């Protein structure tokens, strides 16, 4: 489709300017004020009064995640539809093999599961054990277009790795020039605290944050930073939630170590008072790490401003109330996770840009450009430039909404942002040169996202 977008204000991570954009063959073909177009134009969009941002990239989602209570409630189709709705056009999900399954086999299986994604996508691949084949399998994944690998310091009884094996992963990935992403929580300490709480019958959701205090995250971050330094490997800390973690990350960055950090809207906007109340109202906030205190939120906003935290992911992983009820008598049995892929851009625009915590260029950087740069997708994604994929959001800065489970696109009866008001939303979303959302309607259900092969 050939699309001409006229009169918009283009916002990238480092520039804001008025210009027209011409899209042809799924790519941005021209940018300028008096374009010379010889082909016939299929559609002209007047973007006067709107901003044009690069399509959002969510570097942390879990669609169709298998758990003991069934799959997380969004599959790739429903989750990517919700992502489009909110202005996100690229998703980075995960490959989590079964023990004994090869990384490449799990990657191929996950690619099949993701075939119904509307958004373009790639994966971080998780070694969940270290065997004599793991090094070779990591190299094969890199050849297949994967540049990032994920390890869990928590969840030791299932997908977590011990420090020795994490170090081995870092050595192999570091040598190949890739990046290791980490879920940083000291699993053993958390297990100890959980057992103590259970012995005292403290098993309602209110005790979830008590079982995962900030030091269980920050000490894990400190270990991860030290291991990465020794292994000479770039790392990316997912869902950073605690002020103390930020301090360790910032100190390491100052020494020149390549360490990136992500946080999520829930850690910026919601606090641990959400765990007080009925099961129905509190169980939806059972996420790991848990929601923190006001001081942590302020430290996270400040770290975004300073460039210590580089990206905003959502850790989108919704479960229904029925699934959460698995832990009605014991918070340890509540599946961990909540949705958010749909709201990331509007929340960051409303509570970041409009509240003067971040500039509009920073907004683009943390919701799109940095993820593309860190994970080997730039400038194909995360940029508005000639030759980049035509993934664009035409953003209406006036649209007012109130988030609710009754109206959201996410496939879940729970909503952690219930009742929160936002200003600013996509008017039109373009993915690979096709209009996929137009004035509050999904226009292209049949669109097929592509697996993005990345290179180191
Ligand atoms: O509670 C969470 N975050 N669930 C999803 C899995 C993870 O740890 O990222
Ligand atoms: Zn995690
Ligand atoms: Zn996650």
Image: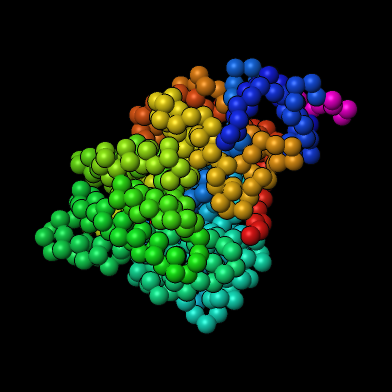
* 422 or 233: nearer the viewer: 233
Instruction: Name the outermost residue toward the top.
Output: 48
Location of residue 54 in the rendering, given as x and y in whole percent from the top left corner: 61, 36
Q: Residue at x 24, y 54 (%)?
A: 213
Q: Which residues are magenta?
A: 36-43
Left or right: where does residue 268 sit relative to residue 89?
A: left
Give above or below for 394 relative to 223.
above
Q: Residue at x 44, y 48 (%)?
A: 262
Left or right: where does residue 440 sit relative to residue 45?
A: left
Instruction: Name the outermost residue toward the front.
Output: 255
- How many numbered markers are drawn? 0
Q: Is residue 299 visible?
A: yes
- Determine the image quadrant of residue 306: top left
Give above or below for 40 relative to 388.
above
- Determine the image quadrant of residue 427: top right
Q: Residue at x 26, y 38 (%)?
A: 294
Location of residue 86 in the rendering, given as x and y in whole percent from the top left corner: 52, 34
Left or right: where does residue 293 sit relative to residue 414?
A: left
Instruction: Name the outermost residue toward the bottom.
Output: 132
Instruction: Name the outermost residue toward the right.
Output: 38
Please, which colouring scheme is shown? rainbow
Location of residue 71 in the rendering, given as x and y in whole percent from the top left corner: 45, 56
* 18 or 124: nearer the viewer: 18
Give above or below for 134 relative to 186.
below
The quarter in which the C terminus is drawn is bottom right
The kind of secondary structure the magenta stretch mainly shows is: loop
Location of residue 443 in the rendering, given as x and y in whole percent from the top left corner: 64, 32
The quarter in which the N terminus is drawn is top right
Q: Is residue 444 visible?
A: no
Q: Residue at x 46, y 37 (%)?
A: 344
């Amino acid at each position: 489709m050939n699309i001409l977008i006229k009169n918009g204000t283009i916002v990238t991570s480092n520039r804001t300017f008025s210009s027209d954009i011409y899209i042809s063959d799924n790519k941005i073909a021209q940018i300028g004020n008096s374009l010379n177009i010889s082909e016939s134009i299929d559609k002209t969009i007047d973007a006067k009064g709107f901003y044009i941002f690069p399509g959002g990239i969510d570097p942390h989602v879990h669609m169709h995640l298998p758990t003991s209570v069934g799959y997380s409630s969004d599959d790739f189709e429903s989750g990517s539809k919700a992502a489009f709705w909110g202005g996100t056009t690229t998703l980075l999900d995960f490959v989590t093999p079964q023990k004994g399954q090869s990384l490449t086999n799990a990657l191929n299986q996950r690619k099949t599961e993701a075939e119904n994604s509307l958004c373009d996508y790639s994966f971080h691949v998780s070694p969940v054990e270290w065997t004599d084949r793991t090094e070779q399998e990591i190299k094969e994944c890199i050849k297949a277009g994967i540049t990032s690998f994920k390890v869990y310091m928590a969840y030791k009884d299932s997908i977590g790795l011990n420090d020795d094996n994490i170090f081995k992963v870092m050595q192999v990935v570091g040598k190949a020039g890739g990046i290791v992403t980490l879920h940083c929580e000291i699993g053993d300490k958390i297990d100890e605290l959980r057992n103590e709480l259970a012995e005292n019958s403290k098993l309602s959701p209110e005790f979830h944050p008590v079982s995962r205090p900030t030091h269980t995250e920050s000490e894990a971050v400190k270990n991860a930073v030290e291991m990465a330094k020794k292994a000479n490997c770039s790392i990316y800390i997912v869902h950073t939630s605690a002020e103390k973690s930020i301090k360790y990350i910032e100190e390491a960055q100052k020494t020149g170590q390549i360490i990136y950090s992500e946080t999520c809207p829930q850690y910026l906007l919601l606090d641990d008072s959400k765990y007080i109340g009925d099961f129905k109202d509190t169980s939806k906030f059972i996420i790991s790490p848990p929601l923190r205190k006001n001081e942590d939120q302020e430290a996270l906003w400040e770290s975004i401003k300073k460039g210590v935290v580089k990206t905003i992911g959502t850790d989108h992983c919704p479960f229904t109330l029925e699934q959460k009820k698995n832990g009605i008598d014991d918070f340890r049995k509540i599946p961990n996770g909540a949705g958010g892929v749909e709201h990331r851009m509007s929340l960051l625009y409303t509570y970041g840009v409009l509240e003067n915590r971040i500039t509009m260029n920073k907004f683009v950087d943390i919701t799109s450009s940095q993820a593309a740069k860190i994970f080997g997708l730039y400038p194909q994604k995360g940029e508005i430039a000639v030759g980049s994929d035509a993934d664009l959001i035409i953003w209406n800065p006036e649209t007012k909404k109130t988030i609710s489970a009754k109206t959201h696109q996410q496939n879940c009866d729970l909503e952690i942002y219930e009742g929160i008001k936002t200003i600013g939303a996509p008017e039109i979303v373009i993915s690979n040169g096709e209009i996929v959302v137009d004035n509050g309607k999904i226009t292209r259900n049949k669109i097929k996202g592509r697996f993005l092969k990345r290179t180191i």
